Image: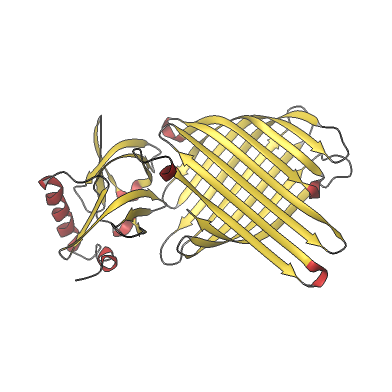
Amino acid sequence: MKSPEENLYVLNRPGLRSLLLLTVLCLASAGPASAQEFIIHADGDSINGDVKGFKHGKLEFEIPGGSSTYIEFDDIATVGSSEYWDIELDDLTRLFGTLEPGSEPGTVRIVGDAGSREVPLASIVQMTSIESGFWSRLDGFLEFGFSFAKANNVTNYTLASQVNYRGTKWASGLSFDSRLNSQDEVETTTRNQASLNFVRLLPKTWYAGAFTQLEQNQELDLDLRLLLGAIGGRDIVQSNKVEWRWRAGLLSNREEYSGLEANTSAEALLGTDFSLFTFGDWENDISSSLSIYPSLSESERVRVDFDIKYRQELFGDFYLSLTFYDQYDSRPPEGATENDYGTTLALGWDW
């Protein structure tokens, strides 16, 4: 008998997909499935497991007695689950319902209170269980990078983390980024940033809510910056390989620079985020974020934050990341630097 791992990759053999689908349909109609049942049949063998979610072209499931496993959507003939799901499609719509085998290989039927809709598995961008608990709706990452050079005792470290929560009506995100650079006979510089957002999810991938951010940057002589305000935005493109969204907002900006009195101003926010994913034996992705803050109360002042990150999967949930960042201020206080930019290399862990 073949192992479950071997069975997962025979689904696309000619003739087997139709036989597989027919088998699944017969089993689905023979009786009710247990909650979160994931069934794959090939060569007379079957796999049952708890479906955990679907994101970036991969279905996460857990075989009883084992750990979580991922399988790409193009290796799946169909999925069946009596769990109630929040499902986002690449046409920017959201559907709620249970899952039944589709009528064609590579499809699934979403059954909700208002009826059912059959969709290709490849059109599902994200799938989250509504019935799951709080902790299962969290995802995020932790990154740590460190370097040391004996010459001049140059030391650099970076620590970054992000935690996201997604419910059926609300979503939130908390992030933290800290960097330190030290060297003999040179003043140690630090850069720290933490942000929190809480938004209401609206139809057609629109969202609106509140945003706050704390910043400190010795390179820019910035002791503290507090941003607080309202934001909104929408996904422009959403698929298993590309995500692109825009955002806008109105913010209050309170700044404290070294040796100067605190100052409060009003700013607008215009931003965009872009991510490109690949999956397979050698997974990687590129993500970038651009935020422009034109001042509404200080003439001709514009701040810009930009970063771009490349991630290369290593093994399990570990990856290697290379990041470039740049902060720009067109009108910093007298004597302060306009730009702060740099690169970091870090080892990361996803959960």
Where is residue 259? Give x, y as percent.
88, 39
Please name the residue shown 77% across and 29% down the image: 264
Please name the residue shown 48% across and 40% down the image: 165
Nearest the viewer among 262 and 135 is 135
In the image, 346: left or right of 223?
Answer: left
Where is residue 20? Give x, y as percent.
17, 58
Please name the residue shown 25% across and 30% down the image: 113
Nearest the viewer among 233 and 148 is 148
Image coloring type: secondary structure
Please name the residue shown 66% across and 38% down the image: 213
Where is residue 111? Give x, y as percent.
24, 37
* Number of callouts: 0
In the image, 148: left or right of 86?
Answer: right
Where is residue 176? Give x, y as percent.
62, 46
Would you identify the image quadrant in which residue 92 lies? top left
Q: Which quarter shows the N terminus? A: bottom left
Would you identify the image quadrant in which residue 197 lies? top right
**Residue found at the very far front of the displayed protein:** 65
In the image, 27: left or right of 93?
Answer: left
Note whether 98 is above or below 18 in the view shown.
Answer: above
Note whether 43 is above or below 54 in the view shown.
Answer: below
Nearest the viewer among 311 and 65 is 65
In the image, 333: left or right of 36?
Answer: right
